[in-house]
Image (cartoon, rainbow, N blue to C red):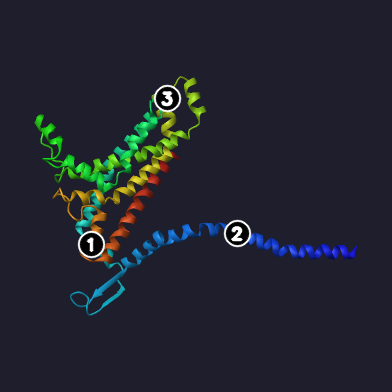
Amino acid sequence: MTTTSLKARREATAAVPARRRRNGATTRAPWLLLAPFLALFLLTFILPIIVAVISSFTKVTRRGLFGEQGISSGFAGFSNYAQALADGNFIGSIWRMLLFGVVQVPVMIVLATVLALLLESASARWPGLFRAAFFLPYGVPGVIATILWSFLYVPGLSPLYSIASAFGLSPDFLGPHSVLWSIANIVTWSYTGYNMLIIIAQLKAIPGEVYEAARMDGASPVRVASSIQLPLIRPALVLTTIFSIIGTLQLFAEPQVLQSVSSSIDSQYTPNLSAYTTAFAYNDYNVAAAQAVLIAVIAFALSFAFLAITNRKSS
């Protein structure tokens, strides 16, 4: 009896380290699987943000014409931010993009929503074909898309000018008052299909029983869209709008390419172009870092404000 109990006690004692090892392996396994992603995330996302923030509070002093007598750096406080905010061209580019977003983002979201509702309606034919056709512009890089559209904007190359002149019109797609909306047209053409697919994914998540109940109640397609589909796809609409707000402040490729054909676009036409010019044309990387941080803060503030407004309306 005593021998049996001693043997059982030894086996239980020996099993404790084995359980601990299994528990430790179970705890480490998820971290080992996540390690490659976490390493890339830290190196390509977190580290650049930290470096940009540190650089925005740093002042580099070069002695000599080309810094041949030495380079020193020190804490600059908020002087880089003050210099960035004192730049009228940078502030003007932010206001320009805010105007751009107020007009272009609602137009794009409305178009994406209408296309999604039409393609998901019961009477739609070949929805897969049209989904692919509408999404195709998103697969065209922004630089290529701008080059393609520039052939329709440049006088002498565009057939639109010949058609307009036949009706006595003389449009100027690249003029100072219209080039912003020419860029908006390119952005809308490129990203409407992408936002449409996000909305379609939300529409497909609506249970079929909801549509069946609406049909039994005699609801028309317009009533189904307004009373069922639009309220239920609200999360997708919020998501696409936030993506569009962030993308507005990141606008870079389209105006940079159109610079070569439009004198109305300067090197600081958008906030990103302004930061790029400050860094690589004026070699003032610290002020450019401050501008980049300000752009990120403004994008975060606008996104947060939009979320707060939409949540307040839904509550």
Residue 27, disc: 2
Q: Quadrant of the N terminus?
A: bottom right
The reply, left or right, for residue 187 in relation to residue 305 is: left
Q: Which one is in front in this view, the residue at disc 1 or the one at disc 3?
A: 3
Q: Quadrant of the C terminus?
A: top left
Q: Are marks 2 and 1 in contact (CB under 8 Å)?
A: no
The answer to which of 291 and 261 lies nearer the viewer is: 261
Residue 249, position as x, y percentages in the image? 29, 51
Residue 278, disc: 1
The reply, left or right, for residue 268 in relation to residue 15 is: left
At horizontal 28% and vertical 45% (from top left) the residue drawn is 101
Earlier residue among tags 2 and 1: 2
The residue type indicated by label 1 comes to: Thr
**Spatial CA span between label 2 and label 1:** 48 Å
Earlier residue among tags 1 and 3: 3
Residue 89, position as x, y percentages in the image? 19, 56
At horizontal 54% and vertical 60% (from top left) the residue drawn is 32
